[in-house]
Amino acid sequence: MSILIVCDRSTELATLIAMTGAAVPDDPVRGFSHPASALDWCENHTPDLVLVDMLMRATNGIELIRRLRALPHMAGVPLVLLLPRGFEQVAASALRHGASDFLATPAVQAELAARVGNLLALRVAQLASGAPGLAAGSGFAGRALVH
């Protein structure tokens, strides 16, 4: 399983990569600090889970999720919007625009680990069932790659 994290704040991105890597130590985690770079990468790769920060300077997280969902091979990939505490009212809009779930930030390790684990388990089940439109993940090598 492969995980992609998109956040334009380097310290927060590094923290999310470390927390996610600790939650799923055998799964590679790739981080992007530029939403456009993440979208470009996803045009040719299919991660198994994507975590997207809501408050980025170049584009907001909901817009990036909408663009990711427009890619046919991303239809079954869980997309999680990372929302600052107090922004929970945005969650309904995010879900309407393609988010699978949301997580309040700063993330709590136990909650992040549980959500990542649950969503990856669902992704494994989707892929095993051969559901239409779901291709195997890109299986990129390495850990904690930041772009």
Image (cartoon, grey):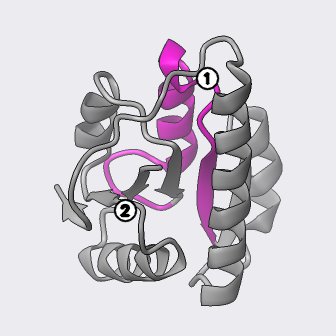
**Is 67 included in the stretch rendered in magenta?**
yes
* Magenta stretch encompasses residue 63: yes
Q: Position of residue 84 (x, y in %)?
A: 61, 74
In the picture of the structure, the residue carrying the numbered disc 1 is 75
Q: Which residues are magenta?
A: 55-84
Q: In the image, 39: left or right of 88?
A: left
Q: Which mark is residue 110?
A: none
Q: Is residue 36 above or below residue 80?
A: above
Question: Who's the residue at 16% across and 55% down the image?
Answer: 147
Question: Above or below — where is 20 with respect to 145?
Answer: below
* Numbered disc 1: secondary structure: loop
Residue drawn at 30 percent across, 57 percent down: 30
Whichever of labels 1 and 2 marks the residue nearer the N terminus, that label is 2
Q: Position of residue 117 (x, y in %)?
A: 66, 65
Q: Secondary structure at mark 2?
A: loop
Residue under numbered circle 2: 7
